[in-house]
Image (cartoon, rainbow, N blue to C red):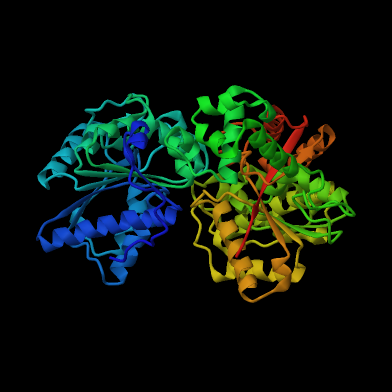
Amino acid sequence: MQELADNSLKNEPLDAETVKFEKINTQIYQDSQSASWYVANEIASLIKQKQDQGQKAVLGLATGSTPTKVYDYLVQFHKEGRLSFKNVVTFNLDEYFPMEPDSIHSYVRFMNEHLFDHIDIEPHNVHIPDGSLSKEEIRKYCLDYEEKIQNVGGIDIQVLGIGRTGHIGFNEPGSSLKSKTRLVRLDRVTRLDAASDFFGEENVPRRAITMGVGTIMEAKRIIIMAWGEGKAPIVQQAVEGEIKESVPATFLQHHKNCDFVLDDAASSYLTRVKTPWLVSECEWDEKLIKTASIWLSGKLDKAILKLTNEDYNEHGMGNLIAEVGSAENINLSVFNQLQRTITGWPGGKPNADDSQRPERAQPYPKTSLIFSPHPDDDVISMGGTLLRLVDQGHDVHVAYQTSGNIAVFDDEVIRFLDFATDVQKDNKDLRKKFKEVRKFLANKKPGELDSPEIQEFKGLIRKGEALAACRYCGVSEKNAHFQNLPFYETGAVRKKPLSEEDVQITYDLLNKLKPHQIFAAGDLSDPHGTHRVCLDVIFKAIQRLVDEGSNWIRNCYVWLYRGAWQEWDIADMEMAVPIGPKDMSRKINAIFKHQSQKDSAMFPGNDKREFWERAEQRNKDTARRYNQLGMAEYEAMEGFVRYHFQ
């Protein structure tokens, strides 16, 4: 098998100090792709080794977004003729109950689509819990499942993901260390996390069949994976916390051959990553000094300029004081860095010294292009900055990258068609169409794909809302660009991989506008979501322009904002735009223009609050944090990180 690139593995062998914190061997990779490549290679090596020995390779497999890239690589190895699965036996962790195997939500279908349909595994060697059984049949079925695992000599490698509750498989909090394959009731958080796949929490099954913790622990080797900041808190608990039933993943600390494989983002709460000075002496650079000072300020609830030599010494940073000389020098340097990130001029302040400002003074006015993955991300995530750019005379454009059509409730379609037929009472074709749509929606099953026509109607609803928000913010309608990137237009939660067509559409828009600054959703740690793909499309288009030697792109600043789910860390922010009470109200009003997402969203994630509530709180929290560090007190702030392309 081809080896990993040398720079993809971020961690060194764990020293004694790190082991004091980490109770599971943990490997950190630059991104989920590198991490998945490592896991796929280990699985492939086991299969080949067992083939050479004339033995079966027994794999325990997981579903969900985490292992999909691993399966992609395994399929790739097979198609390249480097790997056969003839000697492989698989046992899947779990399945929803009740669940028919041909349902679009079944793990049978998931595994077939992602792996089994593309390799040469023998069908009788594939085992996935049967969610179509009657409740009376389940107990015996689960006993038989355990027996089948034992009969093939046990699982050689068990692949796992981790849920936000710390569950492994569907072993929810409260599961015992000795538990075996059984029927379980799903935790509310688990069901909420699955809601997007089922088009609503109410459609998610309340029970599932799962291998037990005891079953998993009997595997000879366990690889548990996690990607993204959203998993960072539970990863830290699983790796560094006490063993307890309320976090089932902590049981893996008992296993003698278990590795936690993470990307950078998922590792961000580990002590050696978040506060490395508490683990061992650090090589201090400007970024680490800034991070450490901000952390110390928060821990002691003291403004940056009030930190003392003793504060640094008592919290593992004595060598920093020894290197720099005094707390006063450190504090002043960090304070000035933070002060320079704050600007009320996100497009640059004309006729001003810009040497200490995030954005350039010239040219003025600028062409500002805001990429919005969905039709409301622009106003949710940077609505205050958008308003400021418009108010300060810049030529603001918004590129809505996807239609957002799957996030519209069916009733919205009926409401708009009802209005249209009332307006055009004599339009028989429209009335006939409305009747057909109502019939389709009345008979639609949970999770069933909309017809192309209804997908179009839903896209038009969101387009109209985006135009209303643009008008409210003062953005000309001709400056609203609806890209409808093809990767998104599947009508399902699962999207197609990005394509050349997606990149070309974005490339053409960039070349047409030649913006002086670009704003994009910087959800870098979201390996499978729409935001991640949209950002990849932008980066690929930009890189093509750079490779072609386009002069204008080298003079363009790219600013990354965060989506509706999280915010940049203060230590990472390179531009912070204050928002006053009046502009906060204007931002919220702009969000309200997206009426189909108001009151209740199709995909709310793990936060039940409306998007405007999340945005307001997040922006106020950023301002409060800056204030606690000793900066001026503002109502709210939006944060940005600058992307530096090669």
User: How many marks are shown on the rendered structure?
Assistant: 0
The answer to which quarter of the image holds residue 587 is: top right
Looking at the rendered image, the quarter that the N terminus falls into is bottom left
Looking at the rendered image, the quarter that the C terminus falls into is bottom right
Measured from the top left, where is residue 560 in percent x and y? 65, 51
For the residue pair 414 and 191, the one nearer the viewer reads as 191
Measured from the top left, where is residue 18 in percent x and y? 37, 36
Measured from the top left, where is residue 126 in percent x and y? 22, 53
For the residue pair 19 and 241, the one nearer the viewer reads as 19
Residue 473 seen: yes
When the figure is inspected, residue 533 is found, relative to residue 407, above or below; the finding is below
The answer to which quarter of the image holds residue 615 is: top right
The answer to which quarter of the image holds residue 185 is: top left
When the figure is inspected, residue 323 is found, relative to residue 425, above or below; the finding is above
Residue 122 seen: no
**Left or right of residue 600: residue 270:** left
When the figure is inspected, residue 545 is found, relative to residue 110, above or below; the finding is below
User: What residue is drawn where x is 27% and y is 39%?
Assistant: 133
For the residue pair 499 and 510, the one nearer the viewer reads as 510
Residue extending furthest right?
A: 351
User: What residue is drawn where x is 73% and y is 65%?
Assistant: 555
Measured from the top left, where is residue 355 in percent x and y? 78, 52
**Left or right of residue 7: residue 318:** right
